[in-house]
Amino acid sequence: MRRRKFTSGVISASGLWLLAAGAPARAAGITESDAALGVRAALERGAASAVALLGKSGGFLDNPKVRISLPGFLNEAAKVLKFTGQQKRIDELVTAMNRAAEAAAPQAKALLISAVKTMSVEDGKQILTGGDNAVTNFFAGKTRAPLSATFLPIVTKATEKVSLAEKYNAVAGKAAGLGLLQRDDANIQQYVTGKALDGLYLMIGEEERKIRKDPVGTGSAILKKVFGSLK
């Protein structure tokens, strides 16, 4: 019952979105119901696409856009270590970091979809009429904190399998104390969790830009109708 009331409330108030979208949307015959369905479709498509791309072997490791490297000072130090025969161990650590992110990514889908279902009228208006990052900003604002809590134990379990993880924390902690590294990067589990979420939102943003640039190419009638009217 509560869900039905919420849905009707979004649709009845979504005329605000159409007013903000301007004359093209009205001229294209976009209804309030269309606006609500179009925004939800864009959100769900972005979420599903990002999770599918990242939550598989190589999703992070083989994608230069989201591949997780050692942070700042440690990455520079690793370049020196490769000349001392330590390259293999560094590579193992970086691989483990990215595998941890890949293992965590599938857990994001349920929370992302839940955020879509609880979208407010104001959220919908901002997404429909916002810039290329409106969907990304919506998800980051609604899900970053709970996803951090969900990802962290998965990342922790994965990184604990690598002997260098403890040494990373020891060295990174000292580096942070000297101002050579940000505090948030001084713990490998927290660092990887943060980077995994950055990658997730980045890929959601990629899908969002595709939808806005070429709504016809999505193959979705509702996305074509709603987002095509804004071009």
Image (cartoon, helix red, strand yellow):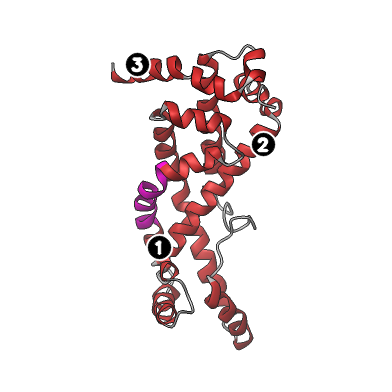
Q: Amino acid at mark 3?
A: Arg
Label 1 residue SS: helix
Q: Earlier in the sequence, mark 2 or mark 3?
A: 3
Task: Say which residue appears at 70% left-offset and 27% top-offset.
Answer: 231
Label 3 residue SS: helix
Note whether 117 is above or below 81 in the view shown.
Answer: above
- Magenta stretch: helix, strand or loop mostly: helix
Task: Say which residue appears at 65% left-offset and 58% top-offset.
Answer: 64
Label 2 residue SS: helix
Task: Name the spot of residue 134 as percent of width and height, x first.
Answer: 54, 38
Task: Give the quarter of the figure containing the N terminus.
Answer: top left
What is the magenta range? 142-154
Q: Which residue is mark 3?
A: 4
Question: Image check: 222 left or right of 198?
Answer: right
- Spatial CA distance of label 1 from label 3 is 39 Å
Mark linked to residue 210: 2
Q: Amino acid at mark 2?
A: Lys
Task: Name the spot of residue 104 as percent of width and height, x first.
Answer: 44, 51
